[in-house]
Image (cartoon, rainbow, N blue to C red):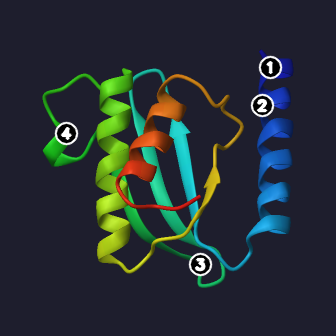
């Protein structure tokens, strides 16, 4: 178990360092995935604050299962909507060490369809 976590942390650090090189001026769309839920935040690293956030635990997502591709796509739409209200259109995508397939990919595609560019 410890080896798996250390590999995950190494992947996460590798992704974050690449993002710092690429787009330090853009906000970061960071995601976190658990076995039951998925979370997304648009973070301004320069200001140190969260500009928009959405998850399967939000009130408008209650009553639906949170661990499937449809729920992830809904979170992607909601975070894109909230980010556009905050005036953000261009972000860098921080997959946070998670592989880009399944729920992570569904969230990213829905955020792109919602108006975010990355």
Label 1: element kind = helix
Nearest the viewer among 15 and 23 is: 23
Residue 33 seen in render: yes
- Give the crowd class for mark 3: few <14, some 14-19, many >=20 residues within 10 Å: few
Q: What's the CA distance linking mark 1 and mark 2? A: 6 Å
Between circles 4 and 3, the one closer to the viewer is 4
Q: Earlier in the sequence, mark 3 or mark 1?
A: 1
Q: Residue at x 31, y 26 (%)?
A: 70
Residue ID for mark 4 = 61
Q: Position of residue 72 (x, y in %)?
A: 38, 34
Q: Quadrant location of the C terminus?
A: bottom right
* Residue at the disc numbered 1: 4
Asked if residue 55 shows in the view, the reply is: no
Query: Which circle's residue, 2 or 3, is located before the other in the chain?
Result: 2
Image spot of residue 81 (x, y percent)? 29, 61
Query: Quarter-wise, where is residue 44 in the image?
Result: bottom right
Question: Disc 1 or 4, which lies upstream in sequence?
Answer: 1
Classify 10 Å Cα crowding around label 1: few (below 14), some (14-19), many (20 and above): few
Badge 3 is on which residue? 48
Position of 102 with respect to 64 (left or right) is: right
Tell me the distance, in whole angstroms, between the alpha carbons under discs 3 and 1: 30 Å
The quarter holding residue 110 reads top left
Q: Secondary structure at mark 2?
A: helix
């Amino acid at each position: 178990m410890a080896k798996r976590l250390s590999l995950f942390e190494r992947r996460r650090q590798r992704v974050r360092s690449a993002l710092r090189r690429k787009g330090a001026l853009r906000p970061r769309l960071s995601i976190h995935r658990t076995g039951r839920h998925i979370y997304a935040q648009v973070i301004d690293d320069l200001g140190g604050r969260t500009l928009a956030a959405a998850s399967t635990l939000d009130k408008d997502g209650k009553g639906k299962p949170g661990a499937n591709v449809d729920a992830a796509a809904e979170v992607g739409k909601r975070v894109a909507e909230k980010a556009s209200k905050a005036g953000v259109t261009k972000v860098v995508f921080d997959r946070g060490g998670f592989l880009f397939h399944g729920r992570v990919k569904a969230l990213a595609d829905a955020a792109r369809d919602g108006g975010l560019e990355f």
